[in-house]
């Protein structure tokens, strides 16, 4: 359901003034494997926007899923300038991202990785937490700075660099923190982005506020459709 909602709202590639490709990253279904897989393949034949790899689609495999995306864009979109990894329960303002963060008229940046900065985040040692990482897997108390996993954007050269360095270090299941570890290993700091562009909390819909952000989290289904209809209808409105 969320994939259909995204295709009908911000994931509609035809509404933008630069070439945009939107893909969904999936692993293997956790329930009714063969039945769900058949439906997934049917959907893929219809829309041609699903990428799948051979691992269970779980929270703990989110890092693998993101690395799959990095590998895919490197192999199949080598002429792209930038890519963005974004969660499915998001409002994404692609126009703002393109014209106020990436600036398509400027030369493509390299070593670029931007998102909501998370600093001094502590590794969780409580076994009951879904964010638990044992000391044997990650010995340090805190993670290097990273971009919040709800959505971050990077230049295409970074997809290749992150994928390569990830083959040499211990993968941890906390996907966004792992990206920070990769950046640390590459000696590449998080890039600057416009203040407040990447919202890390749910914000009640306001047309003018949403006009000036890249993403807002915790929006999906009917709510996202309603917001998008209003957002598009008031496009020329001056805020």
Image (spheres, rainbow, N blue to C red):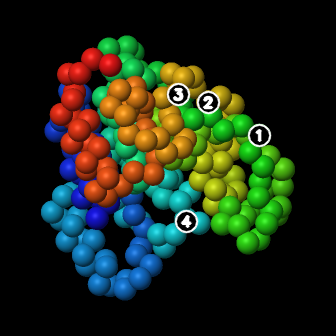
Marks 3 and 4, how far apart at CA? 27 Å
Disc 4 to disc 2, how far (Cα)?
24 Å
Q: Residue furthest top?
A: 106
Q: State the SS at label 3.
A: loop
Mark 1 crowdedness (10 Å alpha carbons): few <14, some 14-19, many ≥20 = few
Quarter holding residue 161: top right
User: Dot 3 corresponds to which residue?
Assistant: 196
Q: Earlier in the sequence, mark 4 or mark 2?
A: 4
Residue receiving disc 2: 190
On screen, residue 108 above or below 48: above
Label 2 or label 1, whichever lies nearer to me, is 1
Pointer 3 or 1: first along the chain: 1
Residue 182 can be seen, yes or no: no
* Kind of element beneath mark 2: loop
* Callout in the foreground (3, 4): 3
Q: Nearer the viewer, residue 84 or 75?
A: 84
**Which of disc 4 and disc 3 is earlier in sequence?**
4
The local crowd at label 4, few if under 14, some if 14 to 19, many if 20 or more residues have their Cα within 10 Å, is few
């Amino acid at each position: 359901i969320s994939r259909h909602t995204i295709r009908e709202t911000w994931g509609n590639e035809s509404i933008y003034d630069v070439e945009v490709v939107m893909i969904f990253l999936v692993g293997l279904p956790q329930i009714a494997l063969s039945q769900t897989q058949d439906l997934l393949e049917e959907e893929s034949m219809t829309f041609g926007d699903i990428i799948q790899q051979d691992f269970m689609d779980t929270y703990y495999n989110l890092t693998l899923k993101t690395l799959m995306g990095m590998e895919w864009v490197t192999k199949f979109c080598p002429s792209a300038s930038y890519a963005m990894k974004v969660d499915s329960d998001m409002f994404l303002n692609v126009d703002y991202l393109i014209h106020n963060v990436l600036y398509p008229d400027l030369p493509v940046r390299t070593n670029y990785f931007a998102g909501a900065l998370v600093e001094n985040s502590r590794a969780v040692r409580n076994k009951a937490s879904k964010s638990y990482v044992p000391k044997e897997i990650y010995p340090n108390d805190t993670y290097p700075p990273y971009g919040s996993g709800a959505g971050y954007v990077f230049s295409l050269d970074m997809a290749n660099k992150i994928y390569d360095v990830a083959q040499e270090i211990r993968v941890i299941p906390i996907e966004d923190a792992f990206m920070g570890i990769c950046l640390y290993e590459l000696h590449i700091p998080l890039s600057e982005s416009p203040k407040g562009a990447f919202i890390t909390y749910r914000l009640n819909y306001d047309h003018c506020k949403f006009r000036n952000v890249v993403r807002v989290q915790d929006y999906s289904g009917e709510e996202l459709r309603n917001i998008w209809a209003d957002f598009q209808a008031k496009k020329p409105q001056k805020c």
